[in-house]
Image: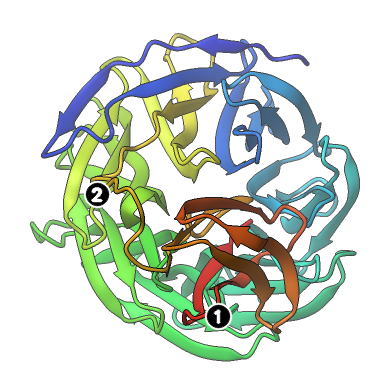
Amino acid sequence: MKRLPIMVIVILLHASLVSATLHGIDWNRTYGASVNNELGERMIATSDGGMIVVSNDCGTGNDSQVWLMKLDSDGEILWENTFGGDGYDWGYGICEAGSDGYYIIGGTESYDNCREVWLTKVNSTGTTLWSETYGTPYNDEGYDIVAMEDGGCVIAGYTDPLGDRKTDEWVLRVDADGDTLWTYSLAYAKDERAYSVHLDASGNIIVTGATGSNSDTRDITVVSLSDEGAENYVKIFNVGNTDFGNKAFPTSDGGMVIAGQTEGIDSGSTDFYQAIAMKLTAAGEQSWITPSGISYWHDYGFDVCEIVDERIVLAGISKNAVSYLSDGYVVEYEKTGEVLDSMAIGDSSSYEWLNDVCLLADGSFAVLGFYDPRDGTGRDVWIVKFNQPVSSTPEVISTLPSHFELADPWPNPFNPTVNIKVEITSPAPLRLTVYNTLGQEVAVLANSTVEAATHTFSFDGRNLGSGVYLVEASVPGEKRQVKKIVLMR
């Protein structure tokens, strides 16, 4: 079924605090059929300024299919495809599969009598290359995925090994053909689920989730694994009465920031949730945690990313205690945790929900979820693209650089391009090289005499796997300088 995008008029209900960095929406659109419910789950940036979007198309019966769209920078659909059988099939995450397509992760009930982890590999135009399921005879599901340098991937989700609904966090490492290399389980309390997975600056696998049960308190879990599945550490964070770690994002200082929600951290109430952003160091130690909210009832943080000046953007929902309706909720934080700005996006009669925030190739960001006008026409995929954030650090313009310097690459983490600036004080031979962590040269960005000036180079990593890379700048008579960059697919 062909779906046409519909422009939505968005009313900004609340914009607060110091800056206006969140103000300025480039465009917003909804996508969907006239009756079905379509729910936006996850998106990743593409080098042309557009995005790949994973959504779920729920039919009028007990069935659903995964809906994959490629959008251009203005939100127009370039191509689309659907995947699934006759039962309940759901897509939660997506990552690039090297240079030849994408991995989509989720759950399926179409191929067995239980829910299974479901991995699909598609090519660059959304055509299925292969599909695999993983799991026990009971219920298992995959929530997030990250690509590995060898062309395979790591999946994070949950497994119910005994069929007693006491789930464990479950991590699977698979190769480029979908064959399982190893698995890891965390069985800490009654109910563990892994919601997020990424690679840190050292190439370790970082898994974020929650432990507890629906009747007991929950805590946020962070697990670090080697690429062979060996456990480096397990961290448990107790913030309030009930805590969720929904999504984590690697930050340019080598640490990470987690989006989630906590119950009762300020008021002590067991019916009052606040969205939280929690910053951790590279060793998994807490640097800061900031609760925020608008509704004074249920405010949740479902995703997070790092933007210009190491600022943080969180996306989620703010739910009203009177109407029980929710608005999309977006918060921006300083890199030290102070809230710079926040807003609810929606109107008083509709229902909005944001699941994802994505840093785009031009440095701007977009949020994804669904929009429900509550008029019987169903829910539609909803994307709001913000204007490119303005740096809070004034740009100093001088005639010539005062010293040789390799500046911090930006954006970092990046996907697929990163900007690299080198300041040269006098004409000199410049060599600018990118290496992998094995010391192997993967790109030479400059190897010639350049004039005294600030030179900007762009590195494109679309043909490389996720991981840590090193940028080295050297000129005769100066100490070589090295910066670390992280390719996040």
Looking at the picture, how far across and down is residue 14, in whole percent? 18, 27
Q: Is residue 305 visible?
A: yes
The residue beneath circle 1 is 202
Secondary structure beneath disc 2?
Answer: loop
Q: Which of disc 2 and disc 1 is earlier in sequence?
A: 1
Discs 1, 2 touching: Cβ within 8 Å: no
What kind of residue is marked 1? Ser
Please give the label number shown on residue 393: 2
Q: Position of 79 compared to 411: left or right?
A: right
Secondary structure beneath disc 1?
Answer: loop
Identified at 74% across, 49% down, the residue is 108
Quarter the C terminus occupies: bottom right
Identified at 85% across, 43% down, the residue is 123
- The correct choice, above or below, for 331 with respect to 440 in the image is above
Identified at 66% across, 11% down, the residue is 4
Please give the label number shown on residue 371: none
